[in-house]
Every structure is written in C-alpha cells, then in structure tokens.
Image (cartoon, rainbow, N blue to C red):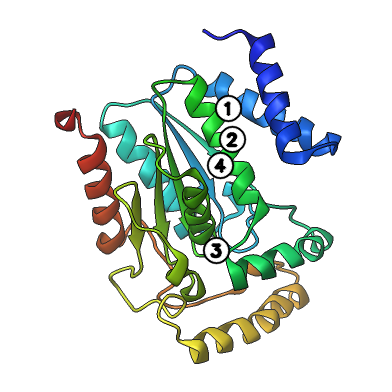
C-alpha cells in the first residue's frame, strides 16, 4: 500500500514540472494518475485505449470495430489468467471548438510527429509503473491513435512494463515509428489493403471529401450520426472478427505474457 498523501504530493510535483503554473492542467493530471493508481493497485494489467481521429471519442461512441479491438485485448488478457483495468486517454474535447483549439497541435503532430500530450501520457505511465511495481500497461491505438501510442513509446524509451498495440498507422508517421519487442504493429487487416497505411491518396481523399455529404444526409432525414460513423474507408477497419487482426494480437499477448513465458 502507498501513502495517499505522499502519492498526491509526488503527482503534484510531476504535474508542475509538466505544466508549470497552469493550475487546471496540474489538477487534471494529478487526479488522473491518482485515480489510475487507486483503481489498478490490485490489477495485473492496465489497458489504455488511445482513440483514433482527434482522440476525443469515448469508447462507447467509437466505431464498433475499434471498440471490438479493446474488448478483444482485455478478453485475451483475462483468458491468460490476469486481472485487468480498461481506461482511455482522451487527447482533447469532443466539440468543434475543442477541435479548432487543438488544430495547431494536430498539424504539428501530422507533419513533425511532435505532440505535447505524448509527453504527458508518458509521464503518467512512468508514475504508475513506479508506484505499482507489478502492473503492466498495454496501450491500444488505431490510425492517429496508433501513431500517438508510438509517440508515447518514443518518450518512454526502454521502460520494460509498457507495451503498445498499433493498428493502421497513417503513412506519414511510418518513417519515425519505432519497432521493438514492446510494440506490435498491424498494417493490414488481412481482408483488404489499408489505403491509410499504403498511401492510397485517391481513395482516402474521395472518402473523406464525401463524408460530410453522408453526415448531412443523416441530419436531413433526422437520423443524425456522429461524423466518424460517416467515414467508410475499406481496408481501414480492424475488426476483432478478422483473423488477420485477432490472431496476431492474441499471438503477441500469448508470446509476451503466457504463463509458460515466465
């Protein structure tokens, strides 16, 4: 057991190193790491979902196939005989104003791979692994979420208890992606080539340009959908039902954490 008062003091110190005098950000960081430590102190694994896109979609609002991956990872870990906690790291708010506010960071991440929130999540994971000596962390990310997970791994370096499962990483991030035994990259769902990974700009552009029209159609017929559900990009879906996805993830988790692996 750890002292709650001492833990809060350490978390606050780390928050001030990250955010300086920005009190809201400091408080948010402190409460988040304390919550994770409290919820995970009797768990073997923490599964952290980094959503795709803007990184703002709560799990219940994600596309069914993205949600199925998180559920599949948790189920596989549970079948290996471990206890697990599932949480998310949301990189921003879910409103148009929040997206506009984060636009500069998103562009910088897209062009240069620089994202201050990767440093923040890396600090959170360091704090958790330092204070929960037996817990292991598995990040799960798709598309921009996969690229973000890899940016976090680059910040962490050789941390031996953080792992990353990355699916459908956008092609612009591939040159700076790191690949170690702590990362699993899946660039193809086994059913169709992923245009986002393989730089099929024609198909990708066509789908994204027509998505607003699909969104508007659902608004007109009074059956509104979230914008992400109006993006239908063949090959850029990684449903757990696809053997090319589930078998690779299960094989990776079994190889790393199977009981006979010690």
- Do the numbered discs 2 and 1 sit on residues whose CB atoms are within 8 Å? yes
Q: What distance separates the C-alpha of mark 3 from that of mark 1?
A: 24 Å
- Do the numbered discs 4 and 2 sit on residues whose CB atoms are within 8 Å? yes
Q: Nearer the viewer, mark 3 or mark 4?
A: 4
Q: Nearer the viewer, mark 2 or mark 1?
A: 2
- Residue 132 appears anywhere in the view: yes
Number of the label disc, if any, that sits on residue 144: 3
Task: Give the structural element (helix, strand or loop) at label 1.
Answer: helix
Task: Give the structural element (helix, strand or loop) at label 3.
Answer: helix
Number of the label disc, if any, that sits on residue 95: none
Look at the picture and state if 213 lies above or below 52.
below
Q: What distance separates the C-alpha of mark 4 from that of mark 2?
A: 5 Å
Instruction: Determine crowd level at label 2: few under 14, some 14-19, many 20+ residues with C-alpha closer than 10 A.
Output: many
Position of residue 70 measured from the top left corner of the image (x, y, whole percent): 44, 47
Left or right of 5 in this view: 162: left
Residue shown at the point (32%, 52%) measured from the top left: 180
Quarter of the C terminus within the rendering: top left
Residue shown at the point (57%, 48%) measured from the top left: 59
Tell me which corner region of the image, top left, top right, bottom left or bottom right, holds residue 123.
top right
Residue shown at the point (65%, 50%) measured from the top left: 117
Task: Give the structural element (helix, strand or loop) at label 2.
Answer: helix
The earlier-in-sequence mark between 3 and 4 is 4
Position of residue 82 measured from the top left corner of the image (x, y, whole percent): 32, 26
């Amino acid at each position: 057991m750890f002292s709650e008062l001492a833990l809060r003091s350490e978390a606050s110190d780390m928050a001030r190193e990250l955010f300086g005098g920005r009190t809201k950000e400091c408080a948010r960081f402190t409460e988040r790491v304390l919550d994770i430590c409290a919820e995970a102190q009797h768990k073997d694994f923490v599964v952290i979902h980094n959503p795709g896109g803007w990184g703002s979609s709560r799990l219940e609002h994600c596309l069914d196939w993205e949600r199925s991956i998180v559920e599949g990872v948790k189920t596989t870990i549970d079948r290996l005989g471990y206890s697990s906690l599932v949480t998310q790291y949301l990189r921003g708010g879910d409103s148009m104003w929040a997206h506009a506010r984060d636009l500069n960071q998103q562009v910088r991440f897209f062009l240069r791979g620089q994202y201050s929130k990767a440093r923040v999540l890396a600090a959170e994971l360091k704090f958790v692994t330092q204070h929960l000596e037996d817990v292991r962390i598995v990040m799960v990310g798709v598309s921009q979420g996969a690229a973000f997970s890899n940016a976090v791994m680059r910040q962490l370096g050789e941390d031996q208890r953080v792992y990353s499962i990355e699916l459908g990483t956008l092609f612009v991030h591939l040159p700076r992606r790191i690949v170690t035994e702590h990362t699993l990259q899946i660039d193809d769902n086994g059913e169709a080539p992923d245009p986002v990974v393989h730089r099929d700009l024609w198909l990708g552009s066509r789908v994204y340009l027509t998505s607003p029209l699909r969104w508007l159609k659902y608004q007109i017929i009074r059956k509104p959908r979230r914008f992400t559900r109006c993006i239908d990009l063949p090959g850029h879906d990684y449903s757990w039902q696809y053997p090319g996805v589930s078998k690779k993830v299960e094989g990776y988790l079994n190889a790393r954490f199977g009981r006979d692996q010690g």
